[in-house]
């Protein structure tokens, strides 16, 4: 039994680790596009499903004992691709579209070993079920150990493996651990052969019918959990607090819920099942509540995670309660859960972002959970249903009008009304699901009510949600998540003045106005509203490198900067790192790196390897300027360490709020001492200490970790300032 537990835990740990390692390894090769991570996720989900289907099919046809021989053979054969062979990211042949190319490279590198690892949980559970061992009557308990292994892989990666090891070192350790896993499988096969139940030996597993309704329930519950944790991840790391590593919390909660429900003595408090209606209602209101910015960010994140945990406990509890009565149908049970997870991931990651301008996948996940809530079978009067609908409508529509600021009793009233309304709706068959469907349809309207903003345009794609609106201060604003990415004055006589981070008194503004560089050509990574184009001249064109084509369209259609630029401006679409390789060497006097998604840092654009590529494109006396304004991350030590490695001079400038200027922090790297002295003496830039001590490990394509540079002061300060009992 111990060996089977060890194999199950270890295989899940390695499965999760290789997902994270290989995705990070691929990012720089493809320019770091979000589609790289999205494509990797879909591939992993598809490979996991394929492994489940394969194990289900051949365990049933061959029987467990004969399949185990095949299983050991697959472990050996798959290792011939990786880990015994190195991962080569450069392939010759016909160029493929991005997603297909990623799929192909994953298939021929880690695809085989990932496929075999994905079958491991089903194999060990079937193995236990046919052995004369204690616990054979409940092989599902091994699924708890599998999720525990995934959870361990999730937690240890950012805090240990990514923090202290390079990608190359991580792969080497993974190879060693895979060998250990293979030896454990061999030992278990040799030891447990004599423990096999006689009636199971070399006997194909019988097929028993399963109703379509039951399979549909397994599929929907599997999909609901995946949709919920993915959508909560998107919300709290994009709209609430773009703090890297927060994505760990929703996935960890999802895995913990599986562990608690599939362990030997399943744990899910009965009150969760009894009050699932109010719990779903509370989570639904959490979609809109942060848009009013009434609670500290920390409280919002905690509430999201608490309600997600309760909903995941419910869905996983419903799965374990509806598990097959016979072990022969166990593999089918897991296949349907995997199909649901795969479909949920596809819908959440790929489909909804192109059909909706809102994060409706969050509400859609709650809708699926609501559909799975059993009817109480008691006919209630129609007037009660109307009452519960009115209470819910009041909470979602009237309350945001009625409440303009934080008020304790206003919040108490909101939670009471939502709890009562959804408790009643849950008792009326599918009333709760129908009400949530109405909320989904009305989401764009309700969002404007809660935010009290009329959006000129709201555009969503795979890179996030862009919102443009006219503020009362007379400014047109572009927002991406919770981060302001540019603004423009609506007055015709002031439209040509760049504002915000790029105003004439900002560090980058004064640098472009001054004669320190006497630039004849400037390159800018990250378009935004195109404010820096106003610093172009007839003698100094500006080249923008922009990943997202929709940003170019928004800048042209809703802002004046690009069309009013005094000099020549070019917008080059595609990832900057890949596009810059096509530019001539020595062409730019200044490169401005201003590419961020929300407040997240694309590490492939801020490391020693990419800096070498930047320098090739600079004139001999040119420089690279990084926009490092960030609420949660401090890039100063990273850039100081990079400057030390490449022999550059480095300085920083921080200009605070003043009128239409927003506080911004910029860091510049130059290799010419004369220009560096001018920056210090004439432009008030402050030199940074470049001694390696205290600057942390050097970032490269092979290593980066944001853990040492996280600054959580803003989150902590928001809690200190919050007075929950204030009126």
Image (cartoon, rainbow, N blue to C red):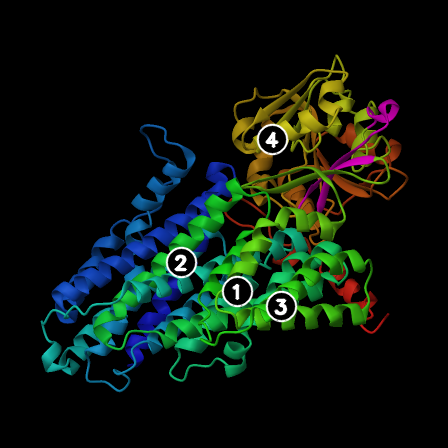
Quarter occupied by residue 495: top right
Q: Secondary structure at mark 3?
A: helix
The reply to whether discs 1 and 3 touch (Cβ–Cβ < 8 Å) is yes
| Residue that numbered label 4 is attached to | 546
Task: Judge depth for marks 4 and 1 and give the one in front.
Answer: 1
Point out which mark residue 431 bears. Answer: 1
The reply to whether discs 2 and 4 touch (Cβ–Cβ < 8 Å) is no
| Rendering coords of residue 192 (x, y %) | 19, 79
Looking at the image, tell me whether mark 1 or mark 3 is earlier in sequence order.
3
| Rendering coords of residue 44 (x, y %) | 38, 52
The reply to whether discs 4 and 3 touch (Cβ–Cβ < 8 Å) is no
Task: Judge depth for marks 4 and 3 and give the one in front.
Answer: 3
| Residue 368 seen | yes
Q: Residue at x 54, y 63 (%)?
A: 250
| Residue that numbered label 3 is attached to | 388
Mark 4–mark 3 Cα distance, whole angstroms, equals: 49 Å
| Residue 613 seen | no
Mark 4–mark 1 Cα distance, whole angstroms, equals: 46 Å
Looking at the image, tell me whether mark 2 or mark 3 is earlier in sequence order.
2
Mark 1–mark 2 Cα distance, whole angstroms, equals: 25 Å
Q: Residue at x 42, y 59 (%)?
A: 223
Mark 2–mark 4 Cα distance, whole angstroms, equals: 33 Å
Residues shaded magenta = 475-497
């Amino acid at each position: 039994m111990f060996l089977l537990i060890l194999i199950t835990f270890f295989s899940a740990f390695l499965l999760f680790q290789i997902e994270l390692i290989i995705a990070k390894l691929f990012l720089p090769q493809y320019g770091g596009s979000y589609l790289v991570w999205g494509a990797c996720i879909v591939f992993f989900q598809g490979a996991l499903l394929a492994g489940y289907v394969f194990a289900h099919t051949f365990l049933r046809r061959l029987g467990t004992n004969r399949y185990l021989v095949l299983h050991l053979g697959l472990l050996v054969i798959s290792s011939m691709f990786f880990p015994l062979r190195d991962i080569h990211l450069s392939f010759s042949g016909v160029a493929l579209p991005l997603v297909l190319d990623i799929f192909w490279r994953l298939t021929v590198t880690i695809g085989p070993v990932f496929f075999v690892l994905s079958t491991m949980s089903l194999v060990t559970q079937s193995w236990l079920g046919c052995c004369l061992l204690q616990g054979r009557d409940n092989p599902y308990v091994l699924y708890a150990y599998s999720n525990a292994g995934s959870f361990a892989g999730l937690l240890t990666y950012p805090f240990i493996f990514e923090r202290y090891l390079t990608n190359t070192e991580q792969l080497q350790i993974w190879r060693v651990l895979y060998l250990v896993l293979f030896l454990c499988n061999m030992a278990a096969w040799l030891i447990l052969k004599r423990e096999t139940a006689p009636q199971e030996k070399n006997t194909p597993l019988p097929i028993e019918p399963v109703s379509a309704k039951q399979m549909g329930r397994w599929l929907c519950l599997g999909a609901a959990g995946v949709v919920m944790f993915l959508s909560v991840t998107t919300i709290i790391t994009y709209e609430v607090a773009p703090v890297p590593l927060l994505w760990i919390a929703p996935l960890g909660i999802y895995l913990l819920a599986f562990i608690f429900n599939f362990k030997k003595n399943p744990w899910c408090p009965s009150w969760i099942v009894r009050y699932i209606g109010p719990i779903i209602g509370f989570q639904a209101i959490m979609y809109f509540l942060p848009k009013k910015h009434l609670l500290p960010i920390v409280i919002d994140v905690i509430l999201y995670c608490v309600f997600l945990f309760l909903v995941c406990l419910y869905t996983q509890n419903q799965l374990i309660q509806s598990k097959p009565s016979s072990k022969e149908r166990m593999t089918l049970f897991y296949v349907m859960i995997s199909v649901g997870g795969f479909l949920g991931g596809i819908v959440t990651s790929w489909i909804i972002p192109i059909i909706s301008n809102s994060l409706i996948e969050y509400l859609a996940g709650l809708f699926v959970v609501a559909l799975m809530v059993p009817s109480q079978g008691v006919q209630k009067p129609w007037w009660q249903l109307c009452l519960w609908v009115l209470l819910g409508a009041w909470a979602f529509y009237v309350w945001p009008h009625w409440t303009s600021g934080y008020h304790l009793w206003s919040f108490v009233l909101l939670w009471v009304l939502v709890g009562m309304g959804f408790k009643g709706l849950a008792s009326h068959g599918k009333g709760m699901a129908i009400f949530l469907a109405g909320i989904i349809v009305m989401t764009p309207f309700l969002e404007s009510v809660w935010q009290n903003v009329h959006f000129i345009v709201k555009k969503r794609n795979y890179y996030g949600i862009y919102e443009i609106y006219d503020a009362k201060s007379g400014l047109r604003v572009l927002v991406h998540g919770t981060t302001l990415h540019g603004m423009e004055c609506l007055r015709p006589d002031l439209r040509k003045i760049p504002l915000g981070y790029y105003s004439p008194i900002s560090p980058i503004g004064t640098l472009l106005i001054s004669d320190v560089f006497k630039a004849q050509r400037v390159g800018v990574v990250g378009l935004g509203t195109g404010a820096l184009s106003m610093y172009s001249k007839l003698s100094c064109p500006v080249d923008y490198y922009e990943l997202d084509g929709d940003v170019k369209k928004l800048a042209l259609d809703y802002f004046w900067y690009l069309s009013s630029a005094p000099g020549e401006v070019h917008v080059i679409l595609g990832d900057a790192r890949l596009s810059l390789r096509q530019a001539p060497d020595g062409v730019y006097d200044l490169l401005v790196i201003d590419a961020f998604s929300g407040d997240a840092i694309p590490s492939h654009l801020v490391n020693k390897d990419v800096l070498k590529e930047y320098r090739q494109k600079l004139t001999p006396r040119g420089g690279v300027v990084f926009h490092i304004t960030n609420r949660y991350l401090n890039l100063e030590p990273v850039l100081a360490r990079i400057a030390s490695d490449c022999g550059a001079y480095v300085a920083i400038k921080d200009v605070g709020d003043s009128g239409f200027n927003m506080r911004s922090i910029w860091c510049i790297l130059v290799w010419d001492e004369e220009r560096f002295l001018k920056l210090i003496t004439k432009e008030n830039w402050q030199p940074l200490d470049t001694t390696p001590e205290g600057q942390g490990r050097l970032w490269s394509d092979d290593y980066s970790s944001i853990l040492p540079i996280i600054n959580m002061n803003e989150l902590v300060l928001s809690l200190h300032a919050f007075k929950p009992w204030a009126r």
